[in-house]
């Protein structure tokens, strides 16, 4: 064990992952959405115009991750996180000072790129690369950071908006990022250097062959893992965006749905906690075969159970699979390919995930417009999670050197 490879794994890799993921909240939809009415009033935007503006900024930032994700491989973690925090702070400053439409768009793009994109990406890469003995639990720390942001920031912002203008809240975020998050992350990244303890030397022949994005797309193991890890973000985004239509069909009230999101967050946190430990004991590859089952049952419940019951089953099922997905999608790439090209590989995954979350609502919207019944949608979803993951991932195993202690 060399001095540059922390023997304990979780600290400080887990602490860095938690804080970086928490800071990504400033570029996440749940946070930016808190200011939606202010944006529309200030810049004279309709609901559809704001949605188009935000969707375009998200799509461009997501596609940018296809190339920018590799900075985790070519820059030290300290430099990469410093650049990320500068982008995030610049986006917050642009939004807070935006004189018009184009300033708002530029700010949203930087927020999405620095927050949802790079900050979350570096959190997971750092945990997966540098936590050698308890990788699953370290990656779970990144999930806790995302969940903590969702739980803490909305009520905090609501309180601040009670006595500050919305622009001032964004400028306050700039101060917090520059003078709080940046120096702390800089310090936490100090011991996290090199390519981690396993490096590329532990990769299989297939993993070692991944030296470019083009070669990545002809690797069977990458494509087979994608067939599983993209399902949860696609389905969750689709159902959450169309929650209004589902509520109308099933008679859910707004207060019931709000409590459903609380259940979703609780199940997500519980599953991330358990998932990290299961990965450490078995492997992320092993979990690929089974962890989507709660999601499939949750979607099926919409067409088979009483509406009042199906809502709780749906939110619980989605939360359980989403929580484990957040951990598995961080650890599985290390198990399959090693750490040397982890930034590039996960950057490609992050870009594809953005595209899948853009496609999910469109697909579900078309199905609902065509009056496809919820029972049929649920049966197709359950059939997929029962058949495809076990069939396509049965031959996936951690490469030599990637098993946990």
Image (spheres, rainbow, N blue to C red):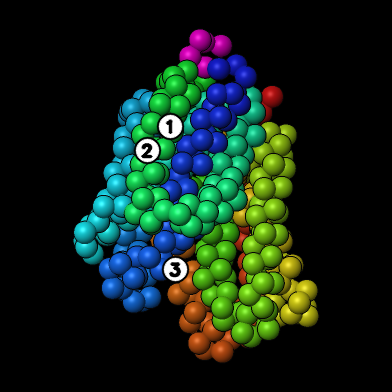
Q: Nearer the viewer, residue 36 or 390?
A: 36
Residue range in magenta is 1-5
Is the residue 153 above or below the residue 314 in the image? above
For the C terminus, the image quarter is top right
Q: What is the total number of numbered labels drawn onto the structure image?
A: 3
For the N terminus, the image quarter is top right
Kindly identify which residue carries mark 1. Answer: 180
Kindly identify which residue carries mark 3. Answer: 359
Kindly identify which residue carries mark 2. Answer: 175
Ranked by sequence position, the earlier of labels 3 and 2 is 2
Residue pictured at 34% horizontal, 70% vertical:
40
What kind of element bears circle 3? helix
Residue pictured at 48% horizontal, 72% vertical:
361
Q: CA distance from mark 3 to mark 2?
A: 36 Å
Q: CA distance from mark 1 to mark 2?
A: 7 Å
Mark on residue 42? none
In the image, is residue 390 part of the stretch drawn in magenta?
Answer: no
């Amino acid at each position: 064990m060399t001095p540059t490879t922390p023997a304990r794994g979780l600290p400080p890799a887990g602490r860095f992952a938690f804080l970086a993921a928490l800071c990504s909240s400033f570029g996440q939809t749940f946070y930016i959405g808190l200011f939606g009415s202010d944006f529309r009033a200030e810049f004279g935007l309709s609901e559809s115009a704001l949605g188009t503006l935000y969707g375009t900024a998200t799509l461009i930032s997501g596609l940018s991750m296809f190339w920018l994700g590799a900075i985790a491989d070519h820059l030290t973690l300290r430099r990469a996180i410093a650049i990320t925090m500068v982008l995030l702070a610049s986006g917050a400053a642009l939004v807070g000072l935006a004189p018009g439409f184009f300033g708002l768009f530029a700010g949203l793009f930087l927020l999405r790129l620095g927050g949802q994109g790079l900050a979350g990406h570096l959190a997971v890469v750092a945990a997966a690369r540098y936590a050698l003995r308890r990788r699953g639990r370290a990656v779970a720390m990144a999930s806790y950071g995302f969940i903590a942001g969702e739980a803490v920031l909305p009520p905090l912002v609501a309180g601040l908006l009670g006595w500050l203008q919305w622009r001032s809240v964004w400028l306050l975020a700039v101060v917090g990022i520059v003078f709080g998050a940046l120096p702390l992350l800089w310090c936490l990244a100090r011991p996290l250097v090199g390519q981690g303890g396993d490096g590329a030397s532990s990769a299989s022949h297939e993993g070692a062959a991944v030296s470019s994005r083009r070669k990545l797309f002809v690797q069977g193991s990458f494509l087979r893992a994608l067939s599983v890890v993209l399902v949860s973000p696609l389905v969750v985004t689709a159902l959450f965006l169309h929650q209004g239509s589902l509520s109308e069909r099933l008679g859910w009230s707004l207060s019931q749905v709000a409590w459903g999101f609380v259940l979703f967050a609780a199940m997500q946190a519980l599953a991330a906690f358990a998932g990290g430990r299961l990965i450490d004991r078995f492997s992320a590859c092993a979990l690929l075969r089974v962890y989507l089952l709660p999601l499939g049952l949750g979607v099926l419940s919409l067409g088979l159970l009483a509406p009042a019951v199906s809502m709780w089953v749906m939110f619980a099922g989605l939360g359980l699979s989403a929580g484990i997905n957040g951990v598995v999608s961080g650890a599985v790439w290390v198990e399959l390919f090693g750490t040397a090209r982890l930034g590039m590989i996960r950057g490609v995954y992050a870009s594809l995930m953005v595209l899948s979350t853009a496609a999910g609502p469109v697909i579900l919207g078309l199905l609902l417009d065509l009056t496809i019944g919820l029972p049929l949608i649920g049966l197709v979803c359950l059939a997929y999670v029962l058949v495809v993951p076990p069939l396509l991932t049965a031959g996936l195993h951690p490469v030599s050197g990637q098993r946990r202690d």
